[in-house]
Image (cartoon, rainbow, N blue to C red):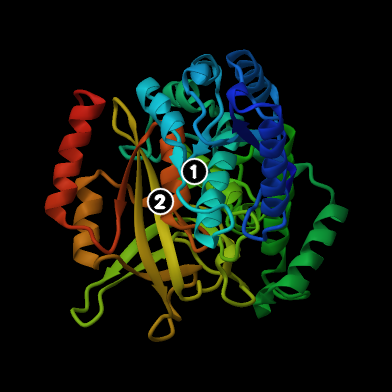
Amino acid sequence: MELKSLEAWFITGSRHLYGEQALRQVAENSGRVVKELNGSSRLPIRVVFKPVVTTPESILQLCREANAAPNCIGLICWMHTFSPAKMWIAGLGALQKPTAHGDREFGFICTRMGKPRKVIVGHWQDAEAQDRLAAWMRAAAGLREMRNLKVARLGDNMRQVAVTEGDKVEAQIRFGTEVNGYGVGELAKRISEVADAGIDRLVEQYDQRYVMAAELRPGGPRREAMRYAARTELSLRAFLDGGQFKAFTDTFEDLVGLEQLPGLAVQRLMADGYGYGAEGDWKTAALGRIMTVMAAGLQGGTSFMEDYTCHLDPQGPKVLGAHMLEICPSLAAGKPSCEIHPLGIGGKSDPVRLVFTAPAGPAINVAMIDMGNRFRLLVNEVDAVEPEQPLPKLPVARAFWTPRPDLKTAAAAWIYAGGPHHTVFSQALSSEPIEDFAEMVEVECLRIDGQTQISEIKNQLRWNQAFYGAGAV
């Protein structure tokens, strides 16, 4: 998750017509731009200067080198004066990494070839231009992660649920993401083999990091339940790391061999960067990992989320977001409380979990949907708010928000778009890197924001259906 280990290559295009002295000056100017961009605190990824390219052969070679460089997330293309774009045809045809640029001639050939990219207009020293470049960098880092992501599914989908299903083969073809299933018995066997010394060390860490409920403290009547939660975390972490999985799912309908539905373990793994989806929802698990990578280094948390219930007070309608157990503590406004409470589904012992409330501030809710003939990304911009009163009968982590433009419009637009109940909620990211990411993977993206109108959303869905071909709206 350390984005500074990645690189964005700064490519300058020119031509020999201007003479060697001019080309030397262009290279010097490009080097200065790169140096000052790297000195900016706004950019999350290091910019790497590359020699000025002036021929089709040098451009093709550079694009091939970018494809082969594992830490290169994409190309920032800056054209000196008027750089003829026919020389870019072979290179762009071979390029497998995203680009950001601003030149018209270069832009024409990208449009002519149907190449997705981001156009950034503005002086390279302007904060706005750098912020737009930073959003593109984060999206490109997410793309790199997606192309190498492995998702483990412990158990299958929640039975009879439609929206959490999806074409895993198509996901691997289009995105590179590999999704495979594993029996929950593999985890149960690992849990039974964990040594007490490791549990002791982890439980001590729990005691230090969280406000511990009285029954979970040393000598408390439920201390062993917390030790089992620690045992689960150690086992699950070893399973994921051993298989190089960065995202995973489980389901309360398949807990054979487990004493608790994993709660605390899942929360802590998300806080360490793993993506998660409940009830077998592998698409949300993958999206969670990708958005966590995009958000690295930013203030605010990113978490698996569900629209738990709606507060339909006409004076201030809101949404309560939560889940049975599994909300990431990166969202916590203060020190989380570690508690144990009954869980009415799953048929297992009372699970341990972290309880907290997310702070107020702007956020986004993002979902990935399989529409049958394509994937769709759906984004709702929201404003998180503080709860108006205590919630003593809601012993789970939670977030409250007001959807933009308002609850009724946002809910209707979400439903028209086929939006699911599971999302990834982020107070670190804005809509821009999500839209940039969708452009890179050539996936439909709909945004519900302060300007949204139902008639326009319905028309956009119809237009997209025509653009992407016959199939579900």
**Nearest to N terminus: mark 1 or mark 2:** 1
Could you tell me which residue is drawn at 72 percent across and 34 percent down?
24
Task: Determine which quarter of the picture holds residue 62.
Answer: top right
Furthest-left residue in this view: 455
Image quadrant holding the C terminus, namely: top left
Could you tell me which residue is drawn at 62 percent across and 59 percent down?
42
Neighbours of disc 2 within 10 Å: few (<14), some (14-19), many (20+): many
Task: Reply above or below: 438 against 3.
Answer: above
Could you tell me which residue is drawn at 44 percent across and 73 percent down?
394
Furthest-right residue in this view: 197
- Circle 1 sits in a helix, a strand or a loop, which is it? helix
Return the x and y of residue 452 as percentages of the image width and height. 22, 58
Side (left or right) of 147 relative to 221: left
Return the x and y of residue 134 as percentages of the image width and height. 56, 51
* Residue closer to the observer: 225 or 116: 116
Q: Which residue is mark 1?
A: 287
Task: Determine which quarter of the picture holds residue 318.
Answer: bottom left
- Circle 2 sits in a helix, a strand or a loop, which is it? strand
Q: Is residue 326 visible?
A: no
Return the x and y of residue 206 as percentages of the image width and height. 74, 67
Q: Which residue is mark 2?
A: 366
* Residue closer to the observer: 242 or 110: 110
Q: Are marks 1 and 2 in contact (CB under 8 Å)?
A: yes
Q: Name the residue type under label 2.
A: Val
Q: Is residue 435 visible?
A: yes
Neighbours of disc 1 within 10 Å: few (<14), some (14-19), many (20+): many
Task: Reply above or below: 311 against 181.
Answer: below
Gap in angstroms between the C-alphas marked 1 and 2:
8 Å
